[in-house]
Amino acid sequence: MSRRPSEILGILGGMGPAATAEFLRLLSVFAPAEKDQDHPRVYLLSDPWIPDRTEAIIGNGPDPGPRILEDFKKLAEWGASLLAVPCNTAHVFIDKLMGEVPLPLIHIVDATISEAASRDSGGAWLLASKGTVASGIYEKHAKERGYPLKIPGEGQREKIHETVRLVKANETQRAGKLLGEIVKTLRDSQNLPFIAACTELPLAWEAGGLPADWMISSLHALALSCIRRLYGGDGAAPTA
């Protein structure tokens, strides 16, 4: 029997908009719902005007932390009881603000590492934006779990970041083609699954027609973690 969650999920989105839209779709797909009224109540604050996270990390832009915290407080004022942010790089700044975050937060990096460890204990390639890689946030959380990560070389990291940029620019087919080339090169080097540690990358992955079972999607991992929290551990099988 399906049941309506009592908690209200507050989503801080817009980083980027296409990834946020896909996250909302996944919440709908994964919810153990039989009718509209069984789905969770969600408050979305889509704020694409938050300063660029990677530019801030590499020292070329303003700190997005204050605006992220301001938006969290708005979601709390609206009545949300739980937070989620479908952007990996944003969590570099969220980690620094954790003592000021007004509500419990489902952490995308923790969720993704947990999913990766359950899928393949031997480790994975990390596909991420330049900012996420430079911050070391995935390595830190993976080390705490004893989970090994393989980081692509600088040239491949530049191409991965370009893939992210292309998705944000609505050039998803070009992004998929480029990502396909990257994945083939890395898999030929070492046969490991791939963590899509930027929420644009699952969109490029699908556009590139890459095998779904090669990828651990941070969007899927976050959506499933939210559904499990909202429904008390229940949730649909990740078939989307």
Image (cartoon, rainbow, N blue to C red):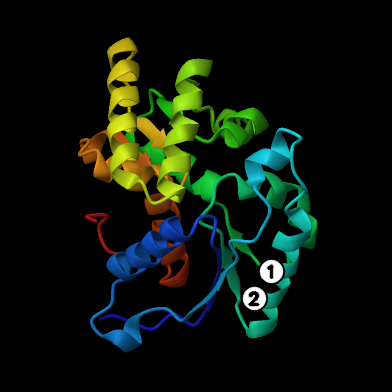
Relative to 31, 43 lies left or right = right
Residue 186 location (% of width, % of height) = 35, 18
Relative to 201, 85 lies left or right = right
Residue projecting furthest to the bottom: 37
Q: Secondary structure at mark 1?
A: helix
The span from disc 2 to disc 1 (Cα, nearest Å) is 6 Å
Residue 209 location (% of width, % of height) = 20, 39
Q: Residue at x 46, y 63 (%)?
A: 226
Q: Nearer the viewer, residue 153 or 103?
A: 153
Q: Residue at x 60, y 66 (%)?
A: 47
Q: In this rendering, is residue 111 above or below 103?
A: above
Q: Is residue 117 visible?
A: no
Relative to 227, 104 lies left or right = right
**Circle on res. 195:** none
The answer to which image quadrant residue 145 occupies is top right
The answer to which image quadrant residue 240 occupies is bottom left
Disc 1 residue type (three-letter)? Asp
Disc 2 residue type (three-letter)? Leu
Q: Nearer the viewer, residue 136 or 111?
A: 136
Q: Which residue bears the numbered disc 1?
A: 71
Label 2 neighbour load within 10 Å: few <14, some 14-19, many 20+ = many
Residue 230 location (% of width, % of height) = 45, 71
Residue projecting furthest to the top: 189
Q: Secondary structure at mark 2?
A: helix
Q: Is residue 166 visible?
A: yes
Q: Residue at x 41, y 25 (%)?
A: 123
Q: Nearer the viewer, residue 174 or 42?
A: 174
Residue 173 location (% of width, % of height) = 28, 43
- Which quarter of the rendered picture does the N terminus lie within? bottom left
Q: Residue at x 42, y 58 (%)?
A: 18
Q: Which residue bears the numbered disc 2?
A: 75
